[in-house]
Amino acid sequence: MEVHLGKLPFDIDFHPSNPLIGVGLITGDLQLYRYAADSQPQRLFEVRAHTESCRAVRFINEGRAIVTCSPDFSILVTDAETGATIARSENAHEAAVNRLVNLTETTIASGDDEGCIKVWDTRQQTCCNTFEAHEEYISDMTFSADSGKLLATSGDGTLSVCSLRRNKVLTQSEFSEDEPLSVVIMKNGQKVICGTQNGVLLLYSWGYMKDCSDRFTGLQSNSIDVLLKLDEDRVITGSENGLISLVGILPNRVIQPIAEHSECPVERLAFSHDKKYLGSISHDQMLKLWDLDDLLNGVGMAPSGGQTVATDSDSDNMEEDVIIPPQPNSGNRRRGNNAQPSISDFFADM
């Protein structure tokens, strides 16, 4: 199944229980589609969510609402049934907002182009945590529910660990020339995997985050723009060459490319609520829904020539209070304008 969106997509998210998928577009529009087997996805609505691009999309409140964010500093909550605006924070951040991640049933986190992360509590209807974690844009975030820690990667070349319980940045990795673009937690919480601009997978050991413990170079030199955890031992990667690959972690190996979205970079990957479908978007302006069973059927488990390069790890207890300052990075940076609006309460109208 596929849909030509007609505009460059930045993010997708599946509804947590129904066959719906939301898409954020470069024009600032939010689109919602219903999908079904053996038929083309049907667009239910399109709303102009933001004055600038819609960079991230997440369903919240058991799928009743959709949160989006934008370089125009705003975060919007849209009714998932009607497309009506529920609440809007015009000045949610002081810089362009480019990432969203669900934390719990009632909290989400947003990251901006200046390295600031905020946690929003829908019950208290306000921002409840702020972390000045990085000096460059937040490229990705993931959450460890068991420990209450939020992990983020950034264009400043570092990985950070923030504690929601203590409201502080616990630790930050040393600078890496392999700029991290994506992050997942695997091996039952024991390993953190980062995809990088240079096509290297960086493996960090939980509790020892100052330096990576392994570097996997089997994906060659293609930028790994997105990681999607399949299970504790396997991750799906989306690369700038348009390939979607299945990769094993410890032992590190490229199991096999499982799909090719196009020759354009894969912008985002996501699973449907029942993990029947894998959704992908790319610079070719296409939304594609792949049958996951078909993709994985017959995939061989033999290594395909990738290599693992071990590196030394520095001891790093994540409960320590010392924060390692990030070092400058000469890589690309996505930024909004330099306006400094005040921070307003979010969800105040919900």
Image (spheres, rainbow, N blue to C red):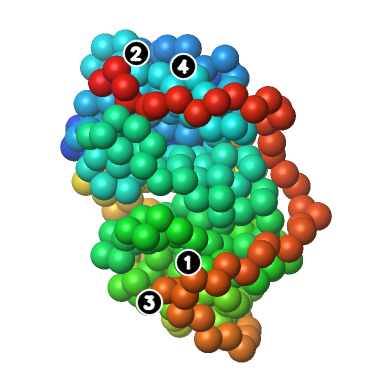
Tell me what residue is drawn at x 53 percent, y 62 percent.
160
Whether label 3 touches label 4, CB < 8 Å: no
Q: Earlier in the sequence, mark 2 or mark 1?
A: 2
What whole-number distance in Å separates the C-alpha atoms at marks 1 and 3? 17 Å
Q: Which label sits on residue 85?
A: 2
The reply to whether discs 2 and 1 touch (Cβ–Cβ < 8 Å) is no
Q: Amino acid at mark 3?
A: Gln
| Disc nearer the start of the sequence (4/2) | 4
Which numbered disc, 3 or 4, marks the residue that appears first in the sequence? 4
- Label 1 crowding class (10 Å Cα cut-off): few <14, some 14-19, many 20+? many
- Most foreground residue, 230 or 114: 114
Find residue 91 and report its horizontal and vertical position in percent: 52, 24
User: Foreground residue, 182 or 269?
Assistant: 182
Q: Residue at x 34, y 13 (%)?
A: 85
Residue that mark 1 sits on = 170
Q: Which image quadrant is residue 128 in? A: top left
Q: What's the mark number on residue 250?
A: none
Rounded to the nearest angstrom, the CA distance separating label 2 from label 1 is: 36 Å
Q: Position of residue 142 (x, y in %)?
A: 42, 55
Marks 1 and 4 in Cβ contact (< 8 Å): no
State the SS at label 3.
loop
The answer to whether 121 appears left or right of 327 in the picture is left
Residue 132 percent across, percent down from the top left: 56, 50
Residue type (three-letter) at the residue carrying disc 1: Leu
Which residue is tagged 3? 190
Query: Considering only vertical position in the picture, is 178 above or below 203?
Result: above
